Amino acid sequence: MTWNALGSLRAAALAITAVALSTGVAVAQKKNDVGVTDTEIKIGNIAPYSGPASAYATIAKTEAAYFKMVNDAGGINGRKVNFISYDDGYSPPKTVEQARKLVESDEVFAVYQVVGTPGNSAIQKYLNQKKVPQIFIGSGATKWADPQNFPWSMGWQPNYQSEARIYSKYIQKNYPGKTVGILFQNDDFGKDYLTGFHDVFGKDSKTIVAEIPFEVTSPTVDSQVVQIKGANPDIFITVATPKFAAQAIKKIGEMNWHPVQFLTNVSVSVAAVMKPAGLENAQGIVSAAYLKDPTDPQWKDDAGLKQWRDFMTKWYPEGDLNDAATVFGYGVAKGLHQVLMQCGDEMTRENLMKQMQKMDMEIGIYLPGIKIKTSDKDWSPIEQLQLMKFEGETWKLFGPMMDGSTGPS
């Protein structure tokens, strides 16, 4: 063999080695975990399409429509989102069953935006043991910001205890000496709010003259409302999901009773709560907001809500443009979209949780000044709220932006 021939062989061998090495590096850089391929990301979701909290089903429908839009535009980093959503009827045992199906049968990358505190509480340990991300949780319970004990769980919306403290401080300042009656859902959701009220009023305070629970399996809360009226509080606070919130407001109106009313943020939808309760019965109710209300005329020409309306018209035309739950679903879908984009080609569950701790974004459907921000020490993406009062056919914002732990912000 001549030196020229030998040189050619060596050059060819070196070229093959270089190609192999470059291919190996490319493969090493592109990491796919369970539920991810080069063309697909499986995202699992559980929502109450039936049962007592079915008003929230539109959230998951909005999210599904959002990811159809994303897929139609080419997906996320070249991958289409396979959004797999199951019904749990707002029943924790069913939530557990559906979570196991998503993880063990569907092999999803992450479990996203499961609606409700009770259901999320039931699956939290299981998902953390399996090291499956439980993210953008559809609940404001404080337990979702506990990375030491549950490093695979993170919420989204302002927490319930902070919201309750905001109402309590407002009551102390504006209604000194007045008494309070509380109707609350008898589960982790309702009890989280109670903790916030007790933080300010004191658990054994004379301010609270009635704390009456109800079960989500009950057909109505009429008897509980009558029971609270018997304690004659000046202020009535409803801690309930939409169906029962509407019932409580309507019953108070039917009894021609006129306490000052407070309503938790999760049930402020005009379409799902105020209209069924009767707009005349809802006048003057106080709540708190972090979303722009789609029924509020001040946002008629708002760029963020215009983008949402355009999305609804094209991708979810059967959705109700007066229902704040669709605004919520759109916002939280945009949040996941951004975090998945941040993951790039390192589509591992561990990297997903790292990116969840690096959120720093503004989404146009939230009130001005609200920023979605997290860090390795702050696992609460949204922490601010502003008080509002129901007047006419819509909510009217008032007062400063507030944080339940620090007051006005």
Image (cartoon, rainbow, N blue to C red):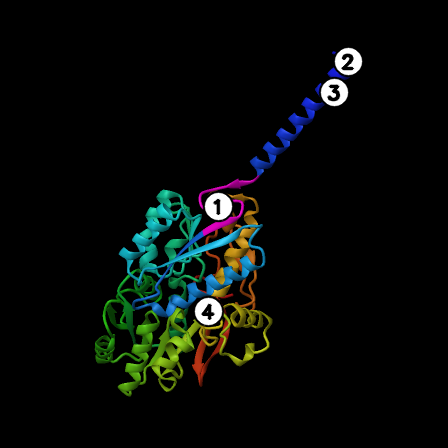
Question: Residue 3 bears which disc, if any?
Answer: 2
Residue 50: x percent and y percent?
A: 32, 66
* Residues at marks 2 and 1, CA–CA distance in whole angstroms: 50 Å
Q: On the image, numbered disc 4 is attached to which residue? A: 326
Residue 62: x percent and y percent?
A: 46, 65
Label 2 environment density (alpha carbons within 10 Å; few <14, some 14–19, many ≥20): few
Residue positioned 77% across, 13% down in the render:
3
Q: Secondary structure at mark 4?
A: helix
Give the left or right position of residue 127, taking residue 315 as reference: left
Q: Secondary structure at mark 2?
A: helix
Q: What amino acid type is highlighted by mark number 3?
A: Ser
Q: On the image, numbered disc 1 is attached to which residue? A: 36
Q: In which image quadrant can residue 200 be found?
A: bottom left
For the magenta stretch, what is the residue range?
A: 30-42
Label 4 environment density (alpha carbons within 10 Å; few <14, some 14–19, many ≥20): many
Q: What amino acid type is highlighted by mark number 4?
A: Thr
Q: On the image, numbered disc 3 is attached to which residue? A: 8
Give the left or right position of residue 156, taking residue 359 as reference: left
* Residues at marks 2 and 4, CA–CA distance in whole angstroms: 74 Å
- Which label's residue is closer to the chain start, 2 or 3? 2
